[in-house]
Amino acid sequence: MATIADVARAAGVSPMTVSNVINGHPHVRESTRVKVLSAMTALDYRVNVAARNLRRGRTGVIGLAVPEIHRPYYGQFAAAIIAAAQRRDLRVSIEQTGASRENELAVLAVSRNRLYDGLILSTVGMGAADVEHLRVPYPVVILGERIFQAPVDHVAMPNVDGARAAVRHLVDRGCRRIAMLTGAETRDVNVSRLRLTGYRLALESAGLAYDPALVQRMDAMSMAAAAERVHTMVAAGLDFDGLFCLTDTAAIGALRAFADLGVRVPAQVKVIGFDSIEEGRFTVPSLSTIDPDHTAMADRAVDLLVRRIEGDRGHEEFVSGFSLVARESTGD
């Protein structure tokens, strides 16, 4: 196997110059860089990333812990994280927590044993009372709202503003009785509570009364659970002409139920989701949704983690922008 010394001899430069080219040093002349790269190609020289990371005291691997990798949203977001990490020569190890507090704490404990250089953690089960568990000697970026006061970075979605825009879109399309499929009520600030806040703000600004009967809480935001709940709502005679779903996954389940029941979307009920998963483009009708800009969120999460790994000890909160994607399910 060729070494840096072999490349240096072939290019007629010093081993330090070869090292500078490999590491992207900005002060190497372009003609020198070309000679070194040509020598590397001719000798089939490969950078030993593992050895380089070992010398730097790193693994070159970051952890990503999400609740359910089989859910379309988390799979799509994990792909964006992997792409962002690859641009920084990092690999990603994915953990599934099952939205369990115990599993989220276990991931933190594993990372403490230095299996990763840093961890991106989507917290669902953990709450504000678990803040001490985040005081760890390695970088952590939290995906979610700033419910923890520990000095860690947060990357969040525009949950309130996005939900408010979704419901306002239904109002603008003529809906006056707008139901919501949301998660179970908790004491901690979470996605369900924040998007419900946006829902209520949109109703208030439109002069529409808030009706608790229209807020349908579910323990699981699965397609099957959403379909079952819509069947129950229709069978009970609940009057609604619009439906805002906490996630696109739930919205797809709702669309299936409306089709089974012969309820025409969007003629009788208009439906909008949140997350902009790829599958929503292909439902019949296609699903209107809020797009929270997964690429921007992934890039910022990885960027923040890399900065902490490199020694920057600050911390910040990033809230992504969003766009409303209007499709057939709301009459567009």
Image: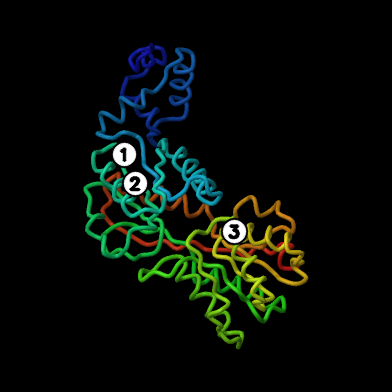
Height in image: 10 above or below 234?
Answer: above
Q: Residue 21 at what x, y percent from top left?
A: 39, 28
Q: Which residue is mark 2?
A: 119
Q: Looking at the picture, how far across and down is residue 197, in whole percent?
A: 48, 76
- Which quadrant of the structure image shows residue 88? top left
The quadrant the N terminus occupies is top left
Disc nearest the viewer among 3 and 2: 3
Residue found 42% across the figure and 17% down from its top = 45
Residue at left offset 41%, top offset 36%: 91
Q: Is residue 41 above or below residue 98?
A: above
Label 1 secondary element: loop
Identified at 46% across, 29% down, the residue is 30
Q: Position of residue 233 (x, y in %)?
A: 62, 71
Residue type indicated by callout 3: Asp
Residue under label 3: 248
Front-lying residue, 207 or 155: 207
- Give the x, y percent position of residue 253: 63, 58
Label 3 crowd bin: few (<14), some (14–19), many (20+), radius 10 Å: many
